[in-house]
Amino acid sequence: MKLGDFDTITSNNAKEAMKMVEENYQDIALILLDVMMPGRSGLAVLESIKNEERYKDILVVLFTVKSFNEDIQKGKRLGADGYITKPFSGKDLLKIVKTMVSEKSVER
């Protein structure tokens, strides 16, 4: 699947997401995580990613419902690089991804 010029991979649950990260981390610039995921929360996945040294360069953006402000705050404490609130359009998502990836490239 493509998002603008970006190649994407998707998963249906937290376990699958972590497996994809483990297998592809060297090629991943950004992970978009739903806070509400089957199996484990996106916050738990975020914590696992941010606690692993080999994943330190991967940006993680959470998405959540606007009313879940405490999830956003917890995500920030766990190291989320950003968040987007649902609902959002593909255009909004692409803008966020482009901005974050280009800022990451400038930092290197």
Image (cartoon, rainbow, N blue to C red):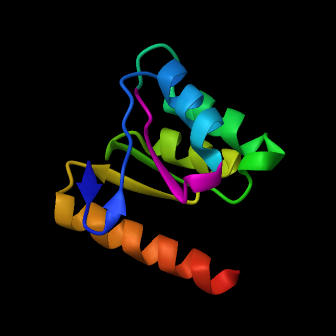
Residue 73 in view here:
yes
Q: Position of residue 74 (x, y in %)?
A: 60, 42
Vertical side of 94 occupied by 52: above or below:
above
From the viewer's perspective, is 78 left or right of 43?
right
**Residue extent of the magenta highlight:** 26-36
Identify the residue at the far top of this view: 39
Query: Residue 26: horizontal and vertical position, in percent?
Result: 65, 52
Residue 42 % position (x, y)? 51, 32
Which residue is found at the position 51% from the left and 40% from the top? 70
**Above or below, comparing residue 8 to residue 19 in the picture:** below
Q: Residue most toward the right?
A: 53
Residue 2 point in image, percent of width and height: 26, 55
> Residue at horizontal 32%, vertical 51%?
85
Residue placed most toward the observer, 79 or 99: 99
Residue at the image point whose x is 68% and y is 45% from the top: 78
Q: Nearer the viewer, residue 96 or 73?
A: 96
Looking at the image, residue 42 lies above or below residue 79: above
| Drawn side of residue 94 relative to residue 79, left or right | left
In the image, farthest residue toward the bottom: 106
Q: Nearer the viewer, residue 7 or 88?
A: 7
Indicate the quadrant containing the C terminus: top left, top right, bottom left or bottom right: bottom right
Q: How many marks?
A: 0
Is 66 part of what is drawn in magenta?
no
Q: Specify whether 71 is left or right of 106.
A: left
Is residue 80 at all visible to an observer of this figure?
no
The image quadrant that residue 34 belongs to is top left
Residue 33 counted in the magenta span: yes
